[in-house]
Image: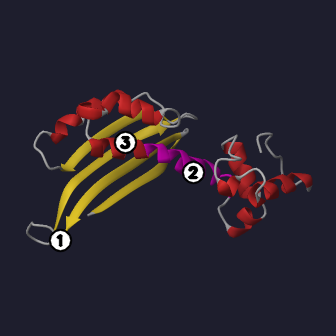
Amino acid sequence: MSRSKTLDATPLGEDRFGFVARLTDTAFHGNFPGGSVVIHDFGAEGVVEGPRLVLRELAVVAYAHPYEDCPFAIPPTVQLIGESVASGWRRTVLAALGGARGCTHVNTLLLGLSELITMVIFLRINPEVAYTPDTRGDGRWTRAAARVAPGLSGACYGLRADGPQVGLARDGINVGVDEMPPSL
Protein backbone atom coordinates (compact mmCIF):
# COMPACT_ATOMS: atom_id res chain seq x y z
CA MET A 1 0.00 0.00 0.00
CA SER A 2 1.09 3.51 -0.68
CA ARG A 3 -0.54 6.82 0.26
CA SER A 4 0.36 9.99 -1.58
CA LYS A 5 -0.76 13.39 -0.31
CA THR A 6 -0.01 16.68 -2.01
CA LEU A 7 -0.92 20.26 -1.24
CA ASP A 8 -0.04 23.21 -3.45
CA ALA A 9 -0.66 26.83 -2.45
CA THR A 10 -0.59 29.82 -4.78
CA PRO A 11 -0.85 33.52 -3.92
CA LEU A 12 -3.84 35.17 -5.60
CA GLY A 13 -3.27 38.71 -4.28
CA GLU A 14 -5.06 40.72 -1.59
CA ASP A 15 -4.13 38.14 1.09
CA ARG A 16 -5.95 35.37 -0.81
CA PHE A 17 -4.40 32.00 -1.57
CA GLY A 18 -5.56 29.22 -3.84
CA PHE A 19 -4.89 25.58 -3.03
CA VAL A 20 -5.03 22.20 -4.73
CA ALA A 21 -4.85 19.07 -2.57
CA ARG A 22 -4.91 15.38 -3.43
CA LEU A 23 -4.93 12.10 -1.53
CA THR A 24 -4.34 8.84 -3.41
CA ASP A 25 -4.14 5.33 -1.97
CA THR A 26 -2.62 2.69 -4.24
CA ALA A 27 -2.39 -1.03 -3.47
CA PHE A 28 0.42 -3.19 -4.84
CA HIS A 29 1.05 -6.93 -5.00
CA GLY A 30 -2.55 -7.90 -4.28
CA ASN A 31 -5.19 -10.12 -5.79
CA PHE A 32 -6.03 -7.84 -8.71
CA PRO A 33 -4.93 -7.56 -12.33
CA GLY A 34 -2.11 -5.29 -13.42
CA GLY A 35 0.03 -5.32 -10.28
CA SER A 36 -1.52 -2.25 -8.65
CA VAL A 37 -4.88 -0.59 -8.17
CA VAL A 38 -5.93 2.87 -6.99
CA ILE A 39 -8.38 2.43 -4.13
CA HIS A 40 -8.98 6.02 -3.07
CA ASP A 41 -8.26 9.18 -5.03
CA PHE A 42 -9.79 12.41 -3.79
CA GLY A 43 -8.97 16.01 -4.65
CA ALA A 44 -9.85 19.41 -3.20
CA GLU A 45 -9.45 22.89 -4.63
CA GLY A 46 -10.32 26.18 -3.06
CA VAL A 47 -9.39 29.59 -1.74
CA VAL A 48 -8.49 30.83 1.75
CA GLU A 49 -8.08 34.46 2.72
CA GLY A 50 -7.11 36.84 5.47
CA PRO A 51 -5.02 36.43 8.60
CA ARG A 52 -7.20 33.55 9.85
CA LEU A 53 -7.12 31.76 6.48
CA VAL A 54 -10.89 31.63 6.19
CA LEU A 55 -12.08 29.10 3.63
CA ARG A 56 -13.92 31.04 0.91
CA GLU A 57 -14.20 28.40 -1.82
CA LEU A 58 -14.06 24.60 -1.72
CA ALA A 59 -14.64 21.91 -4.32
CA VAL A 60 -14.00 18.26 -3.45
CA VAL A 61 -13.84 15.58 -6.16
CA ALA A 62 -13.86 11.76 -5.94
CA TYR A 63 -11.69 10.40 -8.77
CA ALA A 64 -11.56 6.81 -7.49
CA HIS A 65 -13.35 5.14 -4.58
CA PRO A 66 -14.25 1.60 -3.53
CA TYR A 67 -18.03 1.98 -3.16
CA GLU A 68 -20.69 3.50 -5.37
CA ASP A 69 -22.06 5.72 -2.63
CA CYS A 70 -18.69 7.17 -1.48
CA PRO A 71 -19.19 10.42 -3.46
CA PHE A 72 -22.35 11.14 -1.44
CA ALA A 73 -20.03 12.16 1.41
CA ILE A 74 -18.76 15.10 -0.65
CA PRO A 75 -21.72 17.58 -0.73
CA PRO A 76 -21.64 18.18 3.05
CA THR A 77 -18.07 19.50 2.74
CA VAL A 78 -19.52 22.88 1.72
CA GLN A 79 -20.38 23.34 5.42
CA LEU A 80 -16.71 24.15 5.92
CA ILE A 81 -16.86 27.30 3.79
CA GLY A 82 -16.53 30.32 6.06
CA GLU A 83 -14.44 28.45 8.65
CA SER A 84 -10.79 29.18 9.54
CA VAL A 85 -8.19 26.56 8.66
CA ALA A 86 -5.81 28.35 11.06
CA SER A 87 -7.81 27.87 14.24
CA GLY A 88 -9.93 24.94 15.39
CA TRP A 89 -9.90 23.33 11.94
CA ARG A 90 -9.63 19.73 13.15
CA ARG A 91 -12.56 20.16 15.52
CA THR A 92 -14.60 21.87 12.81
CA VAL A 93 -13.99 19.16 10.18
CA LEU A 94 -14.75 16.29 12.54
CA ALA A 95 -17.86 17.98 13.96
CA ALA A 96 -19.28 18.50 10.46
CA LEU A 97 -18.05 15.35 8.70
CA GLY A 98 -17.00 12.81 11.33
CA GLY A 99 -18.24 9.22 11.40
CA ALA A 100 -21.02 8.25 8.99
CA ARG A 101 -21.58 11.93 8.07
CA GLY A 102 -18.41 11.91 5.99
CA CYS A 103 -15.62 9.85 4.51
CA THR A 104 -12.43 9.01 6.39
CA HIS A 105 -10.32 9.67 3.29
CA VAL A 106 -11.98 12.98 2.42
CA ASN A 107 -11.62 14.04 6.07
CA THR A 108 -7.92 13.13 6.02
CA LEU A 109 -7.51 15.24 2.88
CA LEU A 110 -9.41 18.17 4.42
CA LEU A 111 -7.61 17.95 7.77
CA GLY A 112 -4.37 18.38 5.82
CA LEU A 113 -5.51 21.86 4.77
CA SER A 114 -4.26 23.10 8.16
CA GLU A 115 -0.80 22.70 6.61
CA LEU A 116 -1.65 25.79 4.57
CA ILE A 117 -0.67 27.82 7.65
CA THR A 118 3.06 27.16 7.18
CA MET A 119 2.85 27.44 3.40
CA VAL A 120 1.04 30.78 3.52
CA ILE A 121 3.48 32.17 6.09
CA PHE A 122 6.28 31.37 3.64
CA LEU A 123 4.37 32.98 0.76
CA ARG A 124 3.77 36.10 2.87
CA ILE A 125 7.44 36.39 3.87
CA ASN A 126 9.01 35.76 0.48
CA PRO A 127 8.03 39.06 -1.21
CA GLU A 128 9.67 40.89 1.70
CA VAL A 129 12.86 38.85 2.07
CA ALA A 130 14.28 36.32 -0.36
CA TYR A 131 14.74 32.80 1.02
CA THR A 132 18.50 32.36 0.70
CA PRO A 133 21.31 30.94 2.83
CA ASP A 134 22.42 34.53 3.56
CA THR A 135 19.00 35.76 4.76
CA ARG A 136 18.54 32.67 6.90
CA GLY A 137 22.10 32.87 8.20
CA ASP A 138 22.00 36.52 9.29
CA GLY A 139 18.51 36.45 10.81
CA ARG A 140 16.69 38.58 8.21
CA TRP A 141 14.38 35.69 7.24
CA THR A 142 13.42 35.01 10.85
CA ARG A 143 12.82 38.71 11.55
CA ALA A 144 10.53 38.90 8.52
CA ALA A 145 8.78 35.72 9.66
CA ALA A 146 8.09 37.28 13.07
CA ARG A 147 6.59 40.36 11.41
CA VAL A 148 4.34 38.21 9.22
CA ALA A 149 3.43 35.69 11.93
CA PRO A 150 3.75 37.22 15.42
CA GLY A 151 4.29 34.59 18.07
CA LEU A 152 6.31 32.33 15.78
CA SER A 153 9.04 31.99 18.40
CA GLY A 154 8.53 28.63 20.07
CA ALA A 155 6.47 27.18 17.19
CA CYS A 156 9.03 24.43 16.59
CA TYR A 157 12.49 23.28 17.61
CA GLY A 158 14.20 25.41 14.94
CA LEU A 159 12.39 28.51 16.21
CA ARG A 160 12.76 27.84 19.94
CA ALA A 161 13.18 31.01 21.99
CA ASP A 162 16.71 30.08 23.11
CA GLY A 163 17.78 28.73 19.71
CA PRO A 164 20.26 30.14 17.21
CA GLN A 165 17.70 31.36 14.63
CA VAL A 166 15.74 33.45 17.10
CA GLY A 167 19.04 34.65 18.58
CA LEU A 168 20.30 35.77 15.16
CA ALA A 169 17.07 37.62 14.57
CA ARG A 170 17.41 39.40 17.92
CA ASP A 171 21.10 40.18 17.31
CA GLY A 172 20.20 41.88 14.03
CA ILE A 173 18.19 44.42 16.01
CA ASN A 174 21.13 45.23 18.21
CA VAL A 175 23.30 46.10 15.22
CA GLY A 176 20.49 48.05 13.57
CA VAL A 177 19.82 45.74 10.63
CA ASP A 178 16.11 46.43 10.88
CA GLU A 179 13.33 46.58 13.42
CA MET A 180 12.41 43.50 15.38
CA PRO A 181 8.80 42.86 16.23
CA PRO A 182 8.11 42.65 19.96
CA SER A 183 6.86 39.06 19.64
CA LEU A 184 10.33 37.65 18.99
The quarter holding residue 25 reads: bottom left
Kind of residue sitting beneath label 2: Leu
Q: Position of residue 148 (x, y in %)?
A: 67, 44
The quarter holding residue 77 reads: top left
Crowd band around label 3 with a 10 angstrom C-alpha radius: few (<14), some (14–19), many (20+): many
Kind of residue sitting beneath label 1: His
Q: Classify the position of the N terminus by image quarter.
A: bottom left
Sequence-wise, the earlier of marks 1 and 3 is 1
Relative to 68, is 23 on the left or the right? right
Which residue carries the number 1 mark? 29
Nearer the viewer's eye, disc 1 or disc 2? 1
Crowd band around label 1 with a 10 angstrom C-alpha radius: few (<14), some (14–19), many (20+): few
Residue 45 visible? The answer is no
Task: Tell me the SS state at disc 1.
Answer: loop
The quarter holding residue 139 reads: bottom right
Q: Are marks 2 and 3 in contact (CB under 8 Å)?
A: no
Q: Residue lying furthest left in this view?
A: 33
Q: Position of residue 5 (x, y in %)?
A: 36, 56
